[in-house]
């Protein structure tokens, strides 16, 4: 047969076979390196190539058998053609040289180049190839099934079940990495929101609650004028109601309910009849768990208690949402600016009572978050003593200077972040 073929025909057949071999090699890499989650998304949108690729990858043993059958047939026929051409041109001595040349061509042009291209453009080449493979599999299924059966039987001897494709479930840490590496494909604001949601499981109510010493509430032991002043000047919509101290908590007053009551002259009895029963959660409760409790109980406010039942602080649904969405602009009137830049300087004056995670998220800093929840607590843990003004320390590479102290607490510090950290004001 070789004598009946012209040199041009032999070359054309050889190029065709090499292209077929390159197709099998490149598309194999493209299909096996497809992003399974993007593939699933495209398949649910009705993309034909994605749906067929998903079906093919569900049985990788059949897919690999089909690819190897096609690739080996193409390479074998190419070798036969080169051998015939070499015998006609150079005799037996030419066969050896042709074999070396063909091996180089196969390695570079039908292996390395197509596989590299398939890895770099997996969707571009993998999804159209899935349509071709699906049709080929229909034709060659008996042969593919026979080869796969022999291979699978041998693999079972080593405890491998090829007919069960591995699951592709992401762990929480892997999902965090996926969100962080989304880059320009995910807007930075949405990226921060998703990371905040993923961190709810690791964060506890202790990290976002208002401490008991900062709670503003109604003391029923006070004179009515003091109680009325607390109600009229309060910047909060919910006020704890207690007798003597917060430890004698008896309820929580929603000012909206008090206004809607509309019973004329206010007094202590109206407050007691309008207030709701307090809702308690133990300290150490995860924010994810707190969100579930809020949903089930239809509560919006919870008091955090320790193992002895003593109140440690207050947490609201707004505090929880701020961890996900960032600070609400409406809260700006309730508290002074916690982070402000010094004039003509790279340093920042920071309220030491700020939550460390909130500070990191707002400024894109990297202060330690595996210890105390506030900047004040973080500094005290580092120094192991109460510092005076002017004390300087370093927290994870960030120079920190104590600028103001009062009432056995650090009030304000000056932080000069490393230059490589982007400083972005909230």
Image (spheres, rainbow, N blue to C red):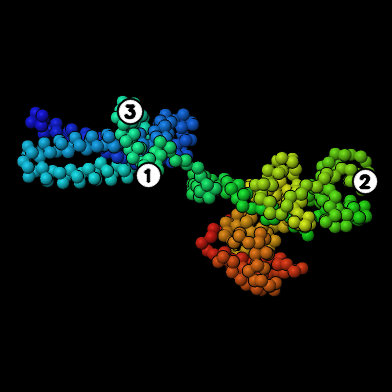
| Place of residue 340 in the rendered image (x, y in percent of width and height, measured from the top left) | 65, 60
| Residue at the image position 27 percent from the left and 38 percent from the top | 22
Q: Which mark is residue 269?
A: 2
Q: Which residue is mark 1?
A: 158
| Residue at the image position 7 percent from the left and 42 percent from the top | 92
Q: Nearer the viewer, residue 80 or 142?
A: 142
Q: Is residue 421 above or below residue 131?
A: below
Mark 1 and mark 2 in contact (Cβ < 8 Å)? no
Label 3 crowd (10 A; few <14 / some 14-19 / many >=20):
some
| Residue at the image position 52 percent from the left and 47 percent from the top | 171
Taking 425 as reference, is 230 left or right? right
| Place of residue 372 in the rendered image (x, y in percent of width and height, measured from the top left) | 65, 61
Q: Nearer the viewer, mark 3 or mark 1?
A: 1
Whether residue 184 is visible to the viewer of this picture, yes or no, is yes
How far apart are the alpha carbons under marks 3 and 1?
Answer: 25 Å
Could you tell which of marks 2 and 3 lies nearer the N-terminus?
Answer: 3
Q: Is residue 77 above or below residue 399?
A: above
| Place of residue 30 in the rendered image (x, y in percent of width and height, measured from the top left) | 36, 40
For label 1, the SS is loop
Q: Nearer the viewer, mark 2 or mark 3?
A: 3
Q: Residue furthest top?
A: 139
| Residue at the image position 38 percent from the left and 37 percent from the top | 60
Q: Which mark is residue 141?
A: 3
Q: Nearer the viewer, mark 2 or mark 1?
A: 1
């Amino acid at each position: 047969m070789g004598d009946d073929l012209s040199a041009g025909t032999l070359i054309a057949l050889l190029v065709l076979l090499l292209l077929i071999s390159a197709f099998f090699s490149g598309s194999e890499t493209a299909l096996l390196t497809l992003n399974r989650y993007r593939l699933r998304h495209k398949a649910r949108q009705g993309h034909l190539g994605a749906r067929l690729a998903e079906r093919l990858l569900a049985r990788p043993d059949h897919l690999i058998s089909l690819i190897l059958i096609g690739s080996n047939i193409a390479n074998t026929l190419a070798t036969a053609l080169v051998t015939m051409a070499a015998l006609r041109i150079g005799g037996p001595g030419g066969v050896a040289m042709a074999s070396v040349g063909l091996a180089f061509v196969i390695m570079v042009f039908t292996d390395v180049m197509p596989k590299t291209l398939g890895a770099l453009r997996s969707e571009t080449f993998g999804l159209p190839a899935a349509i071709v493979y699906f049709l080929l599999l229909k034709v060659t299924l008996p042969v593919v099934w026979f080869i796969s059966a022999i291979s699978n039987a041998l693999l079972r001897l080593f405890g491998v079940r090829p007919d069960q494709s591995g699951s592709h479930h992401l762990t929480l840490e892997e999902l965090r990495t996926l969100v962080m590496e989304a880059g320009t494909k995910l807007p930075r604001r949405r990226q921060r929101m998703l990371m905040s949601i993923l961190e709810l499981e690791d964060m506890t109510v202790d990290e976002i609650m208002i401490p008991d010493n900062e709670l503003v509430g109604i003391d029923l032991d006070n004179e009515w004028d003091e109680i009325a002043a607390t109600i009229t000047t309060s910047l909060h919509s919910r006020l704890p109601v207690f007798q003597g101290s917060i430890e004698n908590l008896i309820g929580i007053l929603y000012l909206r309910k008090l206004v809607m009551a509309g019973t004329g002259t206010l007094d202590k009895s109206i407050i007691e009849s309008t207030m709701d029963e307090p809702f308690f959660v133990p300290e150490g409760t995860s924010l994810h768990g707190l969100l579930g409790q809020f949903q089930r109980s239809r509560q919006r406010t919870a008091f955090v208690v320790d193992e002895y039942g003593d109140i440690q602080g207050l947490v609201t649904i707004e505090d929880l949402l701020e961890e996900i969405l960032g600070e609400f602009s409406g809260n700006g009137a309730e508290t002074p600016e916690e982070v402000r830049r010094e004039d003509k300087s790279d340093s920042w004056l920071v309220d030491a009572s700020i939550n460390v995670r909130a500070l990191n998220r707002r400024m894109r800093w990297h202060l330690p978050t595996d210890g105390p929840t506030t900047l004040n607590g973080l500094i005290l843990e580092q120094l192991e003593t109460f510092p005076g003004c002017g004390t300087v320390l370093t927290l994870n590479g960030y120079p920190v200077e104590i600028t103001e102290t009062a009432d056995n607490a650090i009030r304000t510090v000056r932080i000069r972040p490393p230059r490589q950290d982007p400083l972005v004001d909230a």
